[in-house]
Amino acid sequence: MRGKTALSGNLSFIGLPDILQILGGNNSTGVLRITSQYVPTPGIIYFANGDPINASSGPLQGINAIYAIFGWTEGIFEFHQQKIQVEHVIHNSRMAIILDALKMLDEGVIKKVGPPSLEKLSCAEKNNAVPVLKGPLVDYKYIIQEEDYRDGHKIVLEGGYGDWFWVILEGVVRVMRETSRGPVTILKLGEGCFIGSLASFAFTAHVRNATAMAHGDVCLGSLDIVRLCREYSFLSFDFKRLVLSLDHRLGRVTDRVLDLFLEKDEADGLTGDEDVMVEEGSSKEDMFSITEGKGFVMRQTQKGYLQLLTLAKGDVFGDMPFFDMGHEPRYGSVLGSKDLRTERLDTESLQKEYDNLSGIFRSLVDNVVACVFATTRLACHLREKK
């Protein structure tokens, strides 16, 4: 029996990448059904706690079915919240599916299905291959005022100071960094995403490390920073370390993107004598915090291993079951310097603390994780283009 319809609409208005991010941001469980007059059978995607776990589209099943549905340019969708009893056959994360599918669309691997006139758009769409990240709806009681910005307005300036947080209510914001070859767009953030740094909860004089510019007209909601700081103050010491480590990862991976853009692909700090702390693809479930020494996050690419970032004292690494950053252990390895010292963290306690966060604070953390994932993909793409 179908559950209640929680989300419905037209693919020409809300595309499948946006649908997946909305359902993922709300940890939705149920069935997404998509029909198109250009396809004889509906596409079905099953979700558990926000992640696709199975799918079908005609003769295709699993991940291949989802990839095929990404090619549908028109159609009607309905998501029904309900218990599901299907085999869990898709193990790719939500962000991995979206970014892989958009790349395959750009390369013509996924066939576009729709009106003939739409097929002509494929070349023009190549400039939009970087996905616009989106998040769940935000509780409006945390918004103290709305602010409108016109296309091209710089909301935040790289190198400036500030601890303000905004949520994007309408429109798209480009996150950019300056280089000797001009500005580089790192991310595109859409509705439900946040502008601001988690580090601002811990440091009063926080320096903005990127420029945020309106890409078209934008409406932002200024968040109640006092209320958010109060929730941060009640977090455990270990969870605070985890939050700040996530913010550090995003900054360091962004730096790596700039290095690769400027063709400075050099290993930072590696001597060749490092120990393997976490092996890519391993099922090791431990989580650690660094007390001394350094860790190096590495990822396998088509052109060999890529050093993504360096971890230092206070940073956290290992298996974080409630996050998928596109890093270790599933997508990356961690090497340790000879003087590396760590302490083991209680994963179960951190999981419970994460589950008990307010909806908006969890969304803030999840937003950073999604940005790390997308920026990591960009770094890998730049490496493979060389």
Image (cartoon, rainbow, N blue to C red):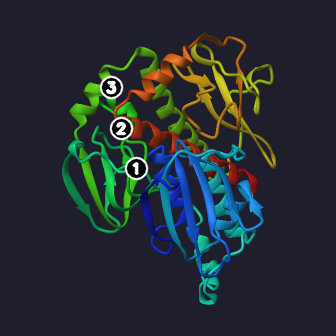
Residue depicted at x 42% and y 42%: 209
Residue tagged by mark 3?
232
> Vertically, is 255 above or below 315?
below
- Residue found farthest to the front: 1
Residue tagged by mark 2?
359
- Left or right of 139? Residue 48 is right
> Vertically, is 81 above or below 338?
below
* Mark 1–mark 2 CB contact (< 8 Å): yes
Residue tagged by mark 1?
136
- Left or right of 110? Residue 303 is right
- Residue found farthest to the left: 145
Give x and y (percent) for residue 309. Answer: 62, 34
> Around disc 2, counting alpha carbons within 10 Å, would you say few (fewer than 14), some (14 to 19), or many (20 or more)?
some
Residue depicted at x 29% and y 26%: 231
Q: What residue type is labelled 3?
A: Tyr
Q: Which of 75 and 227 is in front in this view?
A: 75
> Around disc 3, counting alpha carbons within 10 Å, would you say few (fewer than 14), some (14 to 19), or many (20 or more)?
some
